[in-house]
Amino acid sequence: MTALSRAPSILPRSSRSSVRPAPRGARAVGASTARGPGPARWQRPDLYVYDLCPFCTRARMIFGLKKIPHRLIFMSYDDVETPTALIGKKLAPILHLSGEAPMPESLDIIKRIDDDSRWGPPILQASSGREDLKLFEKKHWPLMRLLIHTRLLHAYVPDLVFRSARDYFIDQHPIQGPSGEERPNIELWRSWEPSLRRSWYQQHFEAWNDASDSS
């Protein structure tokens, strides 16, 4: 149902998806607006995402739940030009419907798609407003950050195929030190040598792996 854009090595050869590198900068705008002939109802939405982004996952779910054919475009994490050309800043997810301006924000995208009669009646319920889930995330996020962020760099994630993308990710996400050092603020973190930042990530990753092997 989905046409994927990204590096061929990410998916197995047996995948039915069409895979190719995502364009950058202003060319990405042209690619997202280019449509073949045919009725408007067959013009597929473009959804620009990062595979590692939970908000992008949330936006992708509505397309799966309603079985909506669409183009899924993975941006490299260090690609500032493409989202900036689309919405004026580096942010994902981004929805681009034919004849409309590209729009960010996962909840707005979900509502836009769910409320569109072309894809059937709305299926989602109103937010539950459960405070316990928010408290759980707030309490456990420091540990989740270490577990998730340090492992992403070793996963087959389309957004982090390039070394420059992995370096950019580290640059944007400070973590606490491997010996219990306090997590630095973003300004201090970016002032350090890249090799030191990478070392903290790698030491955490190896420590978690050693703990898993010994358990």
Image: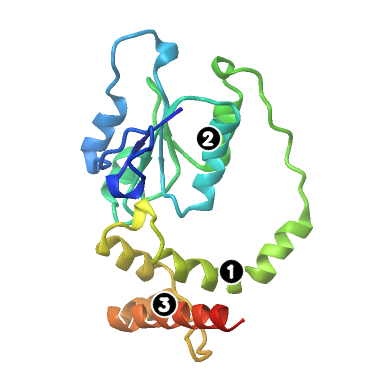
Disc on the earlier residue, 1 or 3: 1
Q: Nearer the viewer, residue 73 or 114?
A: 73
* Residue projecting furthest to the front: 14
Q: Mark 2 against mark 1, which lies toward the viewer?
A: 1
Q: Which residue has dot 2 on it?
A: 109
Q: Is residue 161 at all visible to an observer of this figure?
A: yes
Q: Are marks 2 and 3 in contact (CB under 8 Å)?
A: no
Give x and y (percent) for residue 89: 36, 48
Q: Which amino acid lies under the numbered mark 1 shown in the image of this protein?
A: Met
Is 168 left, or right, of 95 in this rendering? Answer: left
Is 29 left, or right, of 17 in this rendering? Answer: left
How dense is the environment of label 3, judged by Cα within 10 Å: few (below 14), some, or many (20 and up)? many
Between the C-alphas of marks 1 and 3, the distance is 14 Å
Give x and y (percent) for residue 88: 34, 44
Q: Residue at x 57, y 20 (%)?
A: 116
Report the quarter where the C terminus lies: bottom right
Q: Which residue has dot 3 on it?
A: 201
Q: Secondary structure at mark 2?
A: helix
Tell me, for residue 144, which label it has, or none. Answer: 1
Give x and y (percent) for residue 80: 29, 52
Disc on the earlier residue, 2 or 3: 2
Q: Residue at x 31, y 43 (%)?
A: 6
Disc on the earlier residue, 2 or 1: 2
Give x and y (percent) for residue 177: 47, 86
